[in-house]
Image: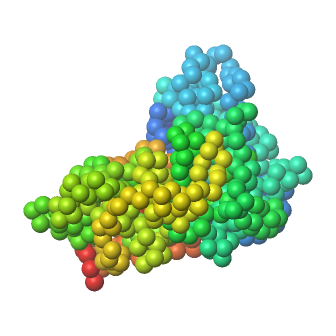
Amino acid sequence: MNIESGARAGVRPARDLEKLLHEIDGRGYPAYKDVKGAYDFGRFVLVIDHVQGDPFAAPSRLRLLLTPSSMGLPPWACSTDLRCIATADWLVRRFARALDERRRRPPVSMPASSSPRPVSEGGAGNGRPWYGSGKSGLIDIDRPGQQILPSTAAVVTPARVELRFVAGLPAAGRRILGRQAAAMLASEIPALVNRSLVLGSRDLSDLETHIFTVEDQEALRAALAAHRLIAFVADGSILPRESGISDRPRRGPNVVPFTAPDSLAVTLDTPHGGPVRGLGIPAGVTLIVGGGYHGKSTLLRSLALGIYNHVPGDGRERVVTDPTAVKIRAEDGRRVEQVDISPFIRNLPFGADTRRFSTEEASGSTSQAANIVEALELGARVLLIDEDTSATNFMIRDRRMQALISKDREPITPFIDRVRSLWEDRGVSSVIVVGGAGDYLDVADTVIHMDHYRPLDATAAAREVAARFVTGRLQEDPQPFPVLLPRRPVPESVDPRRGSRVKIKARGVDEIAFGFEEIDLAAVEQIVHPGQTRAIGAMIQYLAEHYLDGRTPLREALEKLMAEIKERGLDILSPHGSPVGDLALPRLFEVGAAINRLRSLSVRVGPA
């Protein structure tokens, strides 16, 4: 089979792999290194890129190389970049389901004379018992969540399909189980390919639904600006999630489908689903109000994730948001490096400069101010804020507090006094969940009342209440929102090395070990997959090596990196040019957020 794959020259017949595995049976684990290379199985080529050092190490990295014609994949499935991304995501999910079926089957039997005791340890990665030690028998792939992200788990082009996965090569202790490895690589993997990557007419119908769902979401998102909207939630959407640790939709009789009130309803066209009616959230200042547990934060969370496309059946596959929307919260203890927080905080005791504010341990108010300014610096046009995760003194200072503590003794200009100028001077919209700060009714353009998970238009009622119950609150800073100075990272301060070794390791979606530093991302809520965190670590290193020079503003450097990834793919981040299958694309905003939380970061401020 001739596939232009970038694999090593000299693709060998599959029988050579079986023969080699039988020959090294019983030898020490390092002999597995001999199987690296590419093997032709007829319908596909199996490439073994990296062999783990021992059965307890990270599993070996493998690839499947196929042509669309060998799979029965029609040209329409990869006719555009967006369709290639959707098809790749769909194929990964099919392969993962086939692996789940494998997990439920009994383990492969072995001759009694060579069989060690069965242990469950080897199948810990996929829940399947196996005869062997460490990760023996594991086959797995980087599994997507509810969002459809560009990733390296599968790469689809009109000419080829590449699926990347990991495997734990079988061993007893550190002795090779070659016959079991032959059964796994030469028998099980071809069976997995036939079960998941060879497509019939029913499969193609499901793929078409997957692609059409993605294209409809992109069409809805693209239509927002023309309708002066920053978000759209279609009727029938299911916003509540299964639990606090599950992103799947909640099921059952108490789940309320979303229905827009007539006064806020708009109808947008989609290429496959036709006209779609739903709630249109207009540009400007929008409040989401309502009693506790009525769905305010659930709606805001759905809007925060509306920057991504979702799988069919997720319930939010027709919830879309301006792609520059950034969720903002207070973040006590984070480091801040020369950020201009003066629009919100000035005249600190002892003359601290808030035009170039730095601290090792930010307070709730200073961290929230820095988070907003950093988001604006990176190009955010929509801010999403929940009162519950905000610093109270940053959000509001009511009339009584204004009377008790005069403005010349209060350095904080609360967000309520800046939200209008952000919109009117900078064109930046805000969506704010408010449960207790009624003063915000005075600055809102639109008010959405969530009542038993049903949205109501409370704009007119809010204006009547605001007129009837005048607070007497004074605006504390009527000045236009100022122009922010660009920040230019110093490349030497963004260094992942520990001595002579590069140390970058992602831990879930909340943390990256970067050199001697730990980057805390727990408050960066729009990271949804560990593959994004892994990519962020690699992107920071790539950025420092190629785009940071001490003169280039952070946003400009990030835009150049994102443009290169769009042109060349995420594989530019793979270490030593060896392709990996566990990266997923983040946005520019999340990469920038990680850089800004790097405690070693140093920046130069102002013109170059």
The residue sitting at 67% across, 62% down in the picture is 264
Quadrant housing residue 69? bottom right
Residue 208, compared with residue 323, is above or below; it is above
Closer to us: 4 or 97: 97
Q: Residue 398, percent across and down?
A: 32, 55
Say which residue appears at 73% left-offset and 60% top-offset. 262
Return the residue found at the far left. 350
What is the quadrant of the C terminus in the image?
bottom left
The answer to whether one can see residue 468 in this image is: yes
Q: Foreground residue, 558 or 494?
A: 558
Q: Measuring 58% from the left and 35% from the top, which residue is drawn there? A: 243
Residue 527 visible? The answer is no
Question: Is residue 448 or residue 82 the one in the foreground?
Answer: 448
Residue 174: % across, % down: 48, 29
Q: Residue furthest bottom?
A: 608
Residue 347 lies in what quarter of the image?
bottom left
| Residue 235 x/y as whole percent | 73, 54
Residue 485 image offset from top left, x and y in percent: 30, 77
List the single residue furthest toward the right: 201
Of residues 199 and 411, which is closer to you in this image?
Answer: 411
Instruction: Please indicate whether residue 150 sits to the left or right of residue 539 in the image.
Output: right
Q: Which color mode does the image show?
A: rainbow
Disc count in the image? 0
Rendered position, 31 above or below 542: above
Name the quadrant of the N terminus: bottom right
